Amino acid sequence: MDSSITIGTDAAQNAVRIDVQELLATRLLVQGNSGSGKSHLLRRILEESAGLVQQVVIDPEGDFVTLADRYNHVVVNAGDYSEREIAAMGARIREHRASVIVALDTLDIEAQMSCAAAFLNALFDAPREHWFPALVVVDEAQMFAPSASGDVSDNVRRASLSAMTNLMCRGRKRGLAGAIATQRLAKLAKNVAAEASNFLMGRTFLDIDMARAADLLGMERRQAEAIRDLDRGHFLGLGPAISRRPVSIRIGSTQTATRAGTHSLLPLPDAEPQDMRTMLFAELESMPPPPPPPAPKVVPAHDLMQQFAAQDDDLALAEPAAPPELSPEEAEAAEAAAAAAAEDIEAGIVAALHDMLADPDGAFHPEAFLYQDFSVRCRMARLARVPLDLAQFRRRFALAKGGIFDPADARWADLLDAASRLPDDMLAPFVQIGRAAMEGLPCPDDDALGRAYGTRSPGRIRRLVDYMEKHGAVVVRSDFGGRRSIGIPALGLSTEAE
């Protein structure tokens, strides 16, 4: 099967082709100022390769949703779904090899970055048996992998940048080939841009962007002026999937167009100034209010996932196979194997938690950083997937900070029942106090409670203990020597004085 597609013509009117098979292995970077034709170029690549490879488009402006009218793409309007549903869709997409367009245009920038991070991480974390080749196109990539912090929170920026880095740096072995487009190379994180081996450089005017584009194309600095003189829809291409030498390309036409269309000059209406004023301001008060816009039709996440499955004809048409009947010996062996696998997963979780708490500053890191660290440790332990979601990890890490690594242990049942009456962020210090009471240990000092609570402020710890005492969770006693002990009424136990 021929894996090359035609994207345009060179100066001699010869066809310029891209080897899609090679592109999947070497990735693509597109740069061009607004209006240079980046979106048109991406649309041409997507249209020409639609029948060759699965396509996933991260579309921040909703420009590419019209591809679904002609090609077999499913449009996911991200604003209609939760982060958990978006992540579930990402896993289903890899399983069923569905081509999708994730439209983010109804979200603000911070929500767009969070949604893209959750979706790309789900693609990246898919099981090995679902590592099918897929072309992942990210338009306006400088939004999702910024070179510097902006108006969004640091946690969101780090999560989005980490997802983009995984796509471009480690995605190839998982079948994910990034094709990213940016208005300015200077705004794009260098470790993301550096992983592309194919380049299509459009018109740009700033010296720093021209210099970086010339370096990537292997051109001398004095030749960089040519990038400023490129016409709209013209790009300089280089890379193993395009050409071994820089080639000037005029991008060909497309079968579909953006919903916004093109903006061109129109003659102004012919009306006298007074007539125009009358048309604008007359009878404003007597006009009835406009009818409310129709509510957008929200497709349930379950129905959308069924559309993904329908794209894979074999999976869609195949009847679910009845599970084979097992002999008693085989059933016992399967049960033993499942139990052993569960024990391995639990051992991996406990080992990761121990390693994270071995870091003296581990308890003070942001929650998103800690969960990412936990995910990396699970993959290093060869677990098939991250065994805990964010909420489950938050609870297990809090219990581990309190000294409980096995919450299923019956010894801690009464303590955990008493802890359930407090807010989640107080779980770790309360469990630490309760465990000390149960084991007859001295009362934890403010430093120990601060590490459990994630703060270095003695004032916050005093307020924490006061809050728990006011709500009847603990009783604080201090003797004349200034030694403190804390009792747990629900357990009928107290720590030793310290």
Image: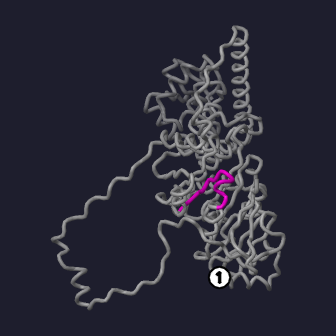
Res 89 quadrant in image: top right
Judged left or right of residue 130, residue 294 is left
Instruction: Work out whether 247 lies above or below 79.
Output: below
- Choose between 54 and 375: the one closer to the eye: 54
Observer able to see residue 496: no
Res 221 quadrant in image: bottom right
Magenta span has 53? yes
Quarter of the image with the C terminus in it: top right
Amino acid under disc 1? Asp
Q: How is the image coloured?
A: one colour
Relative image position of residue 180 (x, y in whole percent): 67, 62
Point 52% across, 19% down: residue: 491
Relative image position of residue 164 (x, y in whole percent): 67, 55
Point 76% across, 82% down: residue: 224
**Outermost residue toward the bottom in this view:** 272
Res 353 quadrant in image: top right
**Outermost residue toward the front in this view:** 1
Magenta part of the protein: which range? 48-60
Relative image position of residue 64 (x, y in whole percent): 55, 61
Q: Mark 1 packing: few (<14 Cα in 10 Å), some, or many (20+)?
A: some
Observer able to see residue 218: yes
Magenta span has 225? no
Instruction: Work out whether 275 lies above or below 384.
Output: below
Instruction: Work out whether 74 lies above or below 190.
Output: above
Q: Which residue is mark 1?
A: 231
- Choose between 383 and 270: the one closer to the eye: 270
**Circle count:** 1
Kindly state the secondary structure of the residue where label 1 is placed.
loop
Point 77% across, 63% down: residue: 194
Relative image position of residue 33 (x, y in whole percent): 62, 76
